Amino acid sequence: MEKDARIYVAGHRGLVGSAIVRALQTQGFTNLILRTRQELDLTDQHAVAEFFAQEKPEYVFLAAAKVGGIMANKTYPADFIYGNLAVQNNVINNAYLHKTKKLLFLGSSCIYPKLCPQPIKEEYLLTGELELTNKAYAIAKIAGIIECQSYNEQYGTNFISLMPTNLYGPHDNFDLESSHVMPAMVRKFHDAKMNNAPHVTLWGTGSAQREFLHVDDLADASLFLMENYNDSSIINVGAGEDITIKELAEMVKKVIGFKGEIMWDATKPDGTPRKLLDVSKLHSLGWKHQIPLDEGITAAYQWFTENTETKRA
Ligand SMILES: NC(=O)c1ccc[n+]([C@@H]2O[C@H](COP(=O)([O-])OP(=O)(O)OC[C@H]3O[C@@H](n4cnc5c(N)ncnc54)[C@H](OP(=O)(O)O)[C@@H]3O)[C@@H](O)[C@H]2O)c1
């Protein structure tokens, strides 16, 4: 990518999009095209076509999506499938029509089959039953991947798809109704500390194992792959190491300085026992994550406390 290339980051106010913008700016890219949802609703076919005809972005990072935790996915499956399919269809088709040189699409580790062997290799996609709670989201994301591959096959485009693990960092969603596990913990421990609560109750037994990647590492990997990866096949992006939810809770509790007890509500589900990506393909290209989990959580919590006005919930 040339430093003055026209680069469109879709979803630039979200967790991933804002990190990609920070990384691009840090690396000296000067010609970023950004639109809020109010300025450009990506589900609006005509508006997206007009935008691409006018701006003709040379590179597209597609980080706009309808994203959420278990509760939100279970409650609003229609919003998840429609929102994601519509955004992807509009952006991917217009990137092709207006000769975008390269597009980066984001899948997710949670769209692999529910009972995958661990660690999860890229080739396990579409080899088994999906997790029921986020089926609508997963089907939409899988459609996006196949869409990118189909355009590459039929039209010779260069659209790549990344499969990131669980992400966290600045601009995360801390709303307990719709957030992922890490920001939900940050919110709960912070509120408990502020209210001098004697304990915090967390879902499940804490025995499930999960992998986490700081979003600045994901943004760094995204730029790296935009420059160095030109293959239709999906590529995992993760830390390659996991911890139990119990260990994570202890870590978050310590960073936040909550002195009370952690209680586990075992009547609530743990989810898949383990979810860890196999990142050997990414490592073989020469990229590895940099931010250790404890440092990343400390930085994320600092952002949380410094942005009480603007943060989500
Ligand atoms: N978070 C994770 O742990 C994780 C893990 C793996 C993969 N990913 C992938 O990374 C991508 C980005 O996720 P994220 O966590 O950054 O989500 P996010 O923080 O919710 O950000 C999504 C962004 O997309 C925008 N958007 C959604 N619908 C739109 C529309 N119709 N028109 C215009 N903008 C729209 C949102 O705008 P508003 O703010 O106005 O709603 C928001 O800025 C997704 O594809 C997701 O699957 C995320």
Image (cartoon, rainbow, N blue to C red):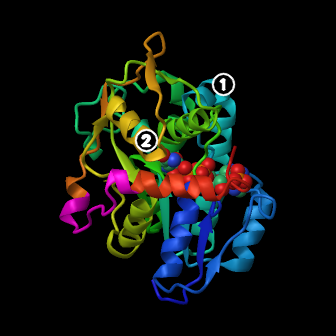
Residue 249 figure quarter: top left
Separation (CA) of disc 2 from disc 1: 27 Å
State which region is magenta.
282-295
Q: Position of residue 217 (x, y in %)?
A: 39, 62
**Is residue 235 something that shows in the picture?**
no
Q: Residue at x 61, y 36 (%)?
A: 191
Quadrant where the N terminus lies?
Answer: bottom left
Q: Residue at x 69, y 35 (%)?
A: 79
Q: Is residue 227 above or below residue 45?
A: below
Quadrant where the C terminus lies?
Answer: top right
Residue 250 figure quarter: top left
Residue that numbered label 1 is attached to: 75
User: Amino acid type of disc 2?
Assistant: Val
User: Amino acid type of disc 1?
Assistant: Thr
Q: Residue at x 40, y 68 (%)?
A: 220
| In front of the other: 146 or 55 | 55
Q: Position of residue 211 (x, y in %)?
A: 33, 42
Element carrying mark 2: helix
**Is residue 274 something that shows in the picture?**
yes
Residue that numbered label 2 is attached to: 252
Choose the circle earlier in sequence order: 2 or 1.
1
